[in-house]
């Protein structure tokens, strides 16, 4: 019989195990409905989305780079049935983090990220304009709220920033997500 040690070595995860865990977690959170005549199973659609996320690319890029990948239209069609990806993602983020956080006031940080967009932004409210960066003035924008505890970053909520969204409204939304999860924010955040 093998003896147990107080300090076991690091757990070695294989890539396939990480991918399977990610697909299962996303599948449970998003609940993508598939029709009777669906060509691609939900697992393939989720792998396609993970591929786009990991390479920081688009659904279109992944679709055109592989012969066996579902088309951009097929993936978007499956995502269309979701009530709110953002809302479900925020629930999923909190479910996996809350058990690790202490029940005392915590210091949170908000991060604002701009992802370059090179298409025609005129008719797309998902695209915002900002100072030129990486050859464009058009961006997808996201804000996240997180806490750093014991050297680890725990993201608790994400907000897709659309054209016309006031920064104060985005911050209030993120704070509401945190306080709605019964976490306590240390100090004053917004001036009255």
Image (spheres, rainbow, N blue to C red):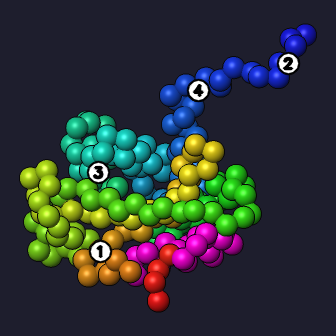
Residue at 48% across, 61% down: 109
Q: Residues within 10 Å of mark 4 (few under 14, many from 20)?
A: few
Q: Which residue is mark 3?
A: 59
Real-space CA distance between mark 2 and mark 1, rounded to the nearest whole angstrom? 53 Å
Real-space CA distance between mark 1 and mark 4, rounded to the nearest whole angstrom:
37 Å
Q: Earlier in the sequence, mark 3 or mark 2?
A: 2
Helix, strand or loop at disc 2?
A: loop
Residue under label 4, please give it. 13
Q: Position of residue 95 (x, y in %)?
A: 65, 59
Q: Quadrant of the N terminus?
A: top right
Q: Is residue 144 left or right of residue 96?
A: left
Q: Which residue is mark 1?
A: 162
Q: Which mark is residue 4?
A: 2
Part of the protein shown in magenta: 169-188
Q: Residue at x 29, y 74 (%)?
A: 162
State if disc 1 and disc 2 touch (CB < 8 Å). Answer: no
Which of the two labelled residues, at mark 3 and mark 4, occupies the earlier sequence position? 4
Q: Is residue 43 magenta?
A: no
Q: Is residue 1 left or right of residue 105?
A: right
Asked if residue 176 can be seen in this view, the reply is: yes
Picture residue at 41% right of the left edge, 45% below the top: 50
């Amino acid at each position: 019989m093998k003896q147990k040690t107080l300090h076991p070595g690091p757990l070695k995860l294989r890539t396939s195990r990480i991918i399977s865990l990610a697909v299962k977690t996303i599948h449970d959170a998003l609940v993508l409905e598939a029709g009777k005549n669906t060509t691609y199973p939900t697992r393939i659609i989720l792998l396609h989305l993970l591929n786009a996320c990991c390479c920081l690319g688009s659904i279109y890029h992944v679709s055109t780079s592989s012969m066996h990948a579902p088309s951009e239209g097929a993936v978007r069609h499956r995502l269309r049935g979701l009530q709110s990806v953002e809302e479900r993602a925020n629930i999923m983020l909190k479910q996996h983090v809350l058990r690790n956080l202490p029940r005392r006031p915590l210091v949170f940080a908000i991060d604002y990220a701009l992802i370059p967009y090179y298409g025609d932004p005129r008719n797309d409210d998902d695209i915002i304009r900002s100072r030129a960066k990486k050859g464009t003035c058009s961006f997808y924008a996201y804000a996240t709220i997180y806490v750093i505890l014991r050297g680890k970053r725990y993201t608790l909520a994400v907000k897709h920033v659309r054209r016309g969204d006031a920064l104060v409204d985005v911050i209030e939304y993120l704070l509401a997500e945190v306080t709605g999860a019964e976490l306590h924010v240390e100090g004053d955040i917004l001036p009255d």
